[in-house]
Each structure stands twice: as C-alpha cells, then as structure tokens.
Amino acid sequence: MTIFEKIVAGEIPCNKVLENDKFLAFRDINPKAPIHILIIPKKHYKNIQEMDPALMGEMLSFIQELARFIGVDESGYRLVTNCGENGGQEVMHLHFHMLAGAKLYWDKNPSNPQSTF
C-alpha cells in the first residue's frame, strides 16, 4: 500500500485542500513553490499509463476546479506528473503536482542535480 492509499484510507493525515468522491488534493509536505498541492485519484493507478482515459477527463475537471478554488486559474500554475522510475516518479500512485504562487522558472539542464520543477 502506498502512502497515498494510506492517506485516502485515513490512516495518515493530510492537509486537504479539495476533495470529492473520486479525487483528493492536499498540500505537499515538502513544497517546491509557495503553493504546492498534490492531486490524486482515490482509486489506485500506478501511473498515468494505467489511468482510465474517461476518468482522466474527470480528473482534469477536478484540477480546473482546484485552480479556481485556490485562485490561480488566471495567474497561472504548473502541473507536473512523473511516470515511472526513469521519469522521476517516487510514489507509485498516479499524482499531479500543482505549483503556483510565484513566477516559476525551469532549469533546462537535466544533468543538474539541483534541478527542481
């Protein structure tokens, strides 16, 4: 069981931002931006390759609702998902990172070990 499954089950607390019957958004405990929210489906999918495309459309609607709810829908945000070990995925449960609250920059040097979002 992944840490995200334990959060969904209520075994581990989280700082919830938005929730419905299929998805959960909560604050990252190690933020990389002033606003850093994780968005997960409550049902376990290892990564985006396993995600049901129809449910992905519902997740997109949830993400758009989240952006409006926290007030970054117009100012902008970055949405990131990693897929698999080589893609940088650390928790093997599909999740998106919503980063916002400041002008975000991109380190275009993938070999830089200090590279962040």
Image (cartoon, rainbow, N blue to C red):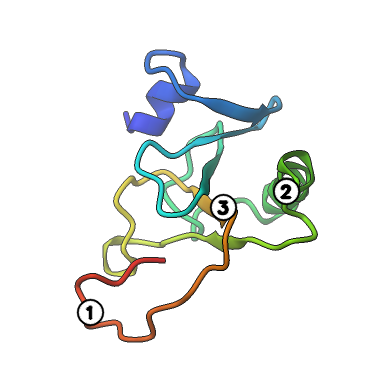
Please state which of residues 79 and 31 is positioned toward the viewer in this rendering. Answer: 31
- Whole-angstrom CA distance, mark 1 to mark 3, is 22 Å
Q: Are marks 2 and 3 in contact (CB under 8 Å)?
A: yes
Residue 81 x/y as whole percent: 48, 59
- Identify the amino acid type marked 1: Asn
Residue type at mark 2?
Ala
Question: Relative to residue 82, is residue 1 drawn left or right?
Answer: left
Q: What is the spatial separation of the Cα atoms under label 2 and label 3, in whole angstroms?
A: 9 Å
Image coordinates of residue 43 in percent, x first then y, are 54, 33
Quadrant holding the C terminus: bottom left
Q: Are marks 1 and 2 in contact (CB under 8 Å)?
A: no
Question: Which of the two labelled residues, at mark 2 and mark 3, occupies the earlier sequence position?
Answer: 2
Disc sitting over residue 112 in the figure: 1
How many callouts does the rendering have?
3
Q: Amino acid at mark 3?
A: Met
| Secondary structure beneath label 1 | loop
Q: Earlier in the sequence, mark 1 or mark 3?
A: 3
The residues bearing labels 1 and 2 have C-alpha atoms spaced at a distance of 30 Å
Q: Quadrant of residue 28?
A: top left
Q: Is residue 89 above or below residue 11?
A: below
The crowding category of the residue bearing disc 3, from other C-alpha atoms within 10 Å (few below 14, some 14 to 19, many at least 20), is many
Disc 2 marks which residue? 67
Dot 2, crowdedness within 10 Å: few (<14), some or many (≥20)?
some
Where does residue 59 sit, x and y in percent of width and height? 69, 47
* Quadrant placement of the N terminus: top left
Q: Position of residue 107 (x, y in %)?
A: 38, 79
What's the residue at 50%, 36% (across, down)? 27
Q: Are marks 1 and 3 in contact (CB under 8 Å)?
A: no
Q: Which mark is residue 73?
A: none
Name the side, left or right, on which 25 lies relative to 54.
left
Tag 3 residue: 98
